[in-house]
Amino acid sequence: MSVVEFCLGMALARRSPQTTGELAAEISLWFDRRVRAPTLKTPLEALLGRGWVAFDAGVYCLSEAGTAALTPFTHALVRMLDGGRRLLDLAVFMSLIKEFERSGS
């Protein structure tokens, strides 16, 4: 799984369904640079080919298989941020992120 594929999956895990344009806008915020929707075609096709996302009526949704595929990478990301000390709890970490997003900070 590439970094872009991971980000697409995370974007869909957080809000689904989304269009390619919506995904590009969200990922642009994360990378702090413009990501054009056409550049997402190849990684989205890879995710579709693995059955990790579904495409219907112009929007993408994360599948159960996609959620299962993202889980170990999400755990790894939290461990990297935690420095391997296992002080960060994934559920608490994700809850904090959602609260941060709701506050608009």
Image (cartoon, rainbow, N blue to C red):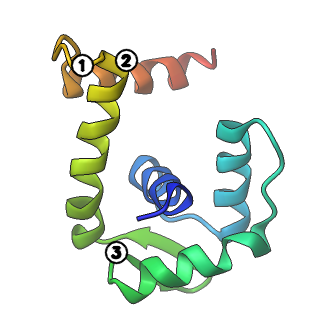
Q: Secondary structure at mark 3?
A: loop
Q: Nearer the viewer, residue 76 or 68?
A: 76
Q: Residues within 10 Å of mark 2 (few under 14, many from 20)?
A: few
Between marks 3 and 2 in the image, the one whose residue lies nearer the viewer? 3
Q: CA distance from mark 1 to mark 3?
A: 25 Å
Name the amino acid, label 1: Val
Picture disc at residue 52: 3
Name the amino acid, label 2: Leu
For disc 1, the marked residue is 92
- First in sequence: mark 3 or mark 2? 3
Residue at the (33%, 27%) spot, across then down = 80
Note whether 49 is above or below 42 in the view shown.
below
Could one spot residue 97 in this view of the protein?
yes
Residue at the (55%, 76%) spot, across then down = 44
Picture disc at residue 96: 2
The quadrant of the image that shows the C terminus is: top right
Picture disc at residue 70: none
Q: Secondary structure at mark 2?
A: helix
